[in-house]
Image (cartoon, rainbow, N blue to C red):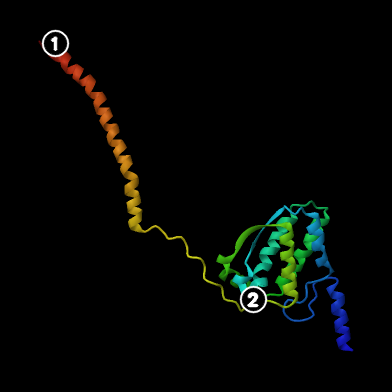
């Protein structure tokens, strides 16, 4: 009897919010997920939406965890595009709430630490609206199936750009100053040649006056 009451309570709760009927993430997939189709229909297919994400092949079992907060921020930016009275904005806010509820179930410090470890693997992309909302559906479905955890090891980061060594810096500074010094020498030579003309004329006048 208790089991039936618990099941009924969970079903009712799922239709009103993001109820937790089991461990892990719970089940965020409710009737509200069907609103993704409305958003895909209302927003033009060629409208690109900016976001940061980490692909599955780089994040492993942490894929859902690492993408919840960046996706939430992306949806907030998208919501700002629409006016205060907009069904699109209302639907977007529903998914923001879903992702918030998922995030609130996690240990904040552990999530932040894991995101920092994977920081170099985040990608900035602009996806067409259809691909973007399919991605949200995949995130929510994976969370509903209990996929996730902090037991993941990041792949190595890409090697940073090779810094300029001290010897290279010296060579660069020397090569940069050489043309400048040559130009200054030419300028000084031109100035001396100009001064030589009036000086020569003065000497000739003095010689002529004396003679």
**Which residue occupies the extreme bottom position in the image?**
1
- Is residue 158 or residue 150 the one in the foreground? 158
- Is residue 175 or residue 15 the one in the foreground? 175
- Is residue 182 rendered to the left or right of residue 69? left
Label 2 or label 1, whichever lies nearer to me, is 2
Instruction: Tell me the CA gap for discs 2 and 1.
Output: 102 Å
| Residue located at (81% from left, 57% from top) | 41
**Which residue occupies the extreme left position in the image?**
211
Circle 1 is placed at which residue position?
Answer: 209
Circle 2 is placed at which residue position?
Answer: 61
x%, y% of residue 141?
A: 75, 72
x%, y% of residue 200?
A: 19, 20
| Residue located at (43% from left, 60% from top) | 162
- Is residue 187 or residue 34 the one in the foreground? 34
Earlier along the polypeptide chain: callout 2 or callout 1? Answer: 2
Q: Examine the rendered structure and indicate whether residue 171 appears above or below residue 119.
A: above
- Is residue 208 rendered to the left or right of residue 140? left
x%, y% of residue 123?
A: 60, 62
x%, y% of residue 42?
A: 81, 55
**Residue 96 position by quadrant:** bottom right
Category of crowding for the residue at label 2, using alpha-carbon neighbours closer than 10 angstroms: few (below 14), some (14–19), many (at least 20): some
Q: Secondary structure at mark 1?
A: helix
Q: Secondary structure at mark 2?
A: helix
- Is residue 11 rendered to the left or right of residue 71? right
């Amino acid at each position: 009897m208790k089991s039936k009451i618990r099941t009924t309570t969970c079903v009712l709760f799922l239709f009103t919010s993001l109820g937790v009927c089991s461990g892990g993430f719970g089940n965020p997939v409710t009737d509200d997920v069907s609103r993704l189709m409305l958003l895909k229909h209302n927003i033009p297919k060629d409208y690109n939406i900016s976001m940061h994400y980490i692909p599955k092949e780089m994040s492993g079992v942490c894929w859902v965890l690492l993408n919840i907060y960046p996706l939430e921020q992306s949806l907030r930016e998208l919501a700002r595009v629409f006016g205060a009275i907009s069904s699109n904005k209302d639907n977007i806010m529903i998914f923001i709430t879903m992702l918030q509820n998922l995030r609130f179930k996690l240990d904040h410090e552990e999530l932040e630490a894991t995101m920092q470890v994977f920081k170099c693997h985040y990608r900035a992309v602009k996806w067409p609206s259809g691909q973007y909302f399919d991605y949200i559906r995949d995130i929510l479905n994976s969370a509903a199936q209990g996929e996730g955890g902090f037991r993941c090891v990041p792949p190595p980061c890409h090697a940073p750009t090779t810094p300029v060594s001290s010897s290279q810096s010296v060579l660069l500074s020397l090569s940069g100053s050489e043309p400048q010094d040559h130009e200054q020498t030419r300028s000084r030579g031109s100035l001396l040649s100009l001064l030589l003309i009036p000086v020569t004329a003065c000497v000739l006048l003095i010689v002529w006056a004396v003679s």
